[in-house]
Amino acid sequence: MREIHLHNTLGNKLEVFTAQQSGCVKMYTCGPTVYDYAHIGNFRTFVFQDILRRFLKLRGYQLDHVMNLTDVDDRIIANAAAAGVSIREYTEKYAQAFFDDCKTLSIEAPEHWIRATDHIAEMVALIERLQQKTFTYPSEGSIYYRIAKFPTYGQLSNIDVAGIQAGARVDNDRYEKESARDFALWKAPKPGEHFWETAIGKGRPGWHIECSAMAMKYLGETLDIHTGGIDLAFPHHENEIAQSEGATGKPFVRYWLHAEHLLVEGEKMSKSLGNFFTLRDLFGKGYKPSTLRFALASVPYRKQLNFTFDGLQSAASSVERLRNFAARLAQGKFPAGRNALLAGRIAEATDEFDAGLADDLNTARALAAVFDLVREVNIAMDKGEFREAEVVPVQEFLAVFDRVFAVMEDNDGEKLRALGFGGDSGPSDAEIEKLIAEREAARKRRDFTTADRVRKELAERGILLEDSRDGSVRWKRK
Ligand SMILES: [Zn+2]
């Protein structure tokens, strides 16, 4: 099997991937901060890490993958206090929405879904370890990390820390590159804010210590892979390294993988520009989950993704083409025998699909292999040159594709209904099958009035029927 190459942000180069423990990948993904609905820029990163974990599984690795919910940070504390509710109450709605959104986009659940607020004790213990090694100092009830004590600080994001004044501090969880400073591990409570009573005093954790403590609790002191959006490389991941390696003296992460930004119609997404979208905004406009997943997955993760409505249309037709192709394969009647030329092409496409993904998850290359084969097989079918013996190999190829891309199942309607979209959203699959059977029965007894009425009724409820040449009937939701 060919080697998997991944781009490591640490060192900024492609490296051959190996797991520390043969066959098992220890991976951590910074999850969402649950103070609002996640937007499509966030989901670009989550779809990327899903493609990564699905490809590793396809290659036979077992995943030990942790994803956290940041349910305590500056914004959550402020919003919960303003709303007069507890942190858990405030974040519950957004946490649930995030789980539902992931499911809708066919993002696999990681082996561990964890919340920051369930791991305060681990964070306190890690801060104590850093205190013992004199990486910290107290100030006004808060505890800060002394970056001057960690000489390789800045290595991941390549920021220049030479000009930074020792002892200059920053209190915000999120800050600009220019303000690289000693950062808060533990924050003293402000009046009216929620706090925890702990061995290191009253207060609450900073955002960065959360991920270090949780990652090491579940995955050990050295992880194989850590993923996130590129905007997390500094300060968040830089600080995770400083904290974890300061405490353990061991490398924290072997491969750092970061997904690039997403633009909308060529511009940075922002609420003020009116181009800010959550998944639900787009479902409300009638786009399907499979369309969004395909659009987010189709651009290799290290390229900026320009999200456009034209792009969504073409993603929708790509998924449609694949599903129609699968239906044609399943329902068509082909002459017996083999087509040796095509059998060779199926093997080549399978290999090229793997080569694309092994090339730092080059999804565009992997998809090109799929669509090239689909086109060739369709042409062969049109010419009557496709043979029965190739049906199963092509289906197996599509199944491999779908273990990674997960768009073939025609379940968009169900997923949208589960999220409350589509109102009276049309008949169930079973109801559709029943009506199609009724129509078939009517046609057999040459009762074309009834057959037409059923077809019309289905069309009005958003179901399109397609009679294929071999007499079978396919259907799809509009
Ligand atoms: Zn994190």
Image (cartoon, rainbow, N blue to C red):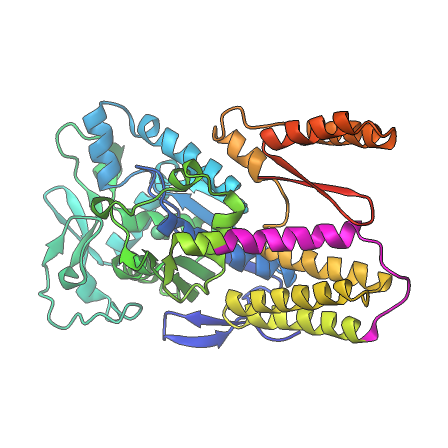
- Residue 234 in the image: x percent, y percent? 26, 61
Instruction: Tell me, yes or no, whether the highlighted magenta stretch contains residue 321.
Output: yes
- Residue 103 in the image: x percent, y percent? 52, 40
Above or below for 318 versus 201? below
Q: Quadrant of the N terminus?
A: bottom right
Q: Quadrant of the C terminus?
A: top right
Residue 200 seen anywhere in this rendered image of the structure: no
Instruction: Tell me, yes or no, whether the highlighted magenta stretch contains residue 452.
Output: no
Most common secondary structure along the magenta stretch: helix
In the picture provided, is 40 more to the left or to the right than 49? Answer: left
Q: Residue furthest right?
A: 336
- Residue 306 in the image: x percent, y percent? 36, 60
Name which residue lies at 15% across and 27% down.
192
Residue 467, by quadrant, is top right
Residue 459 seen anywhere in this rendered image of the structure: yes
Name which residue lies at 26% across and 41% down.
73
Name which residue lies at 49% across and 30% down.
422
Residue 120, by quadrant, is top left
In the picture provided, is 378 more to the left or to the right than 2? Answer: right
Residue 310 or 76: which is nearer the viewer? 310
Residue 53 or 378: which is nearer the viewer? 378
- Residue 168 in the image: x percent, y percent? 9, 58
Residue 383, by quadrant, is bottom right
| Magenta-colored span | 314-340
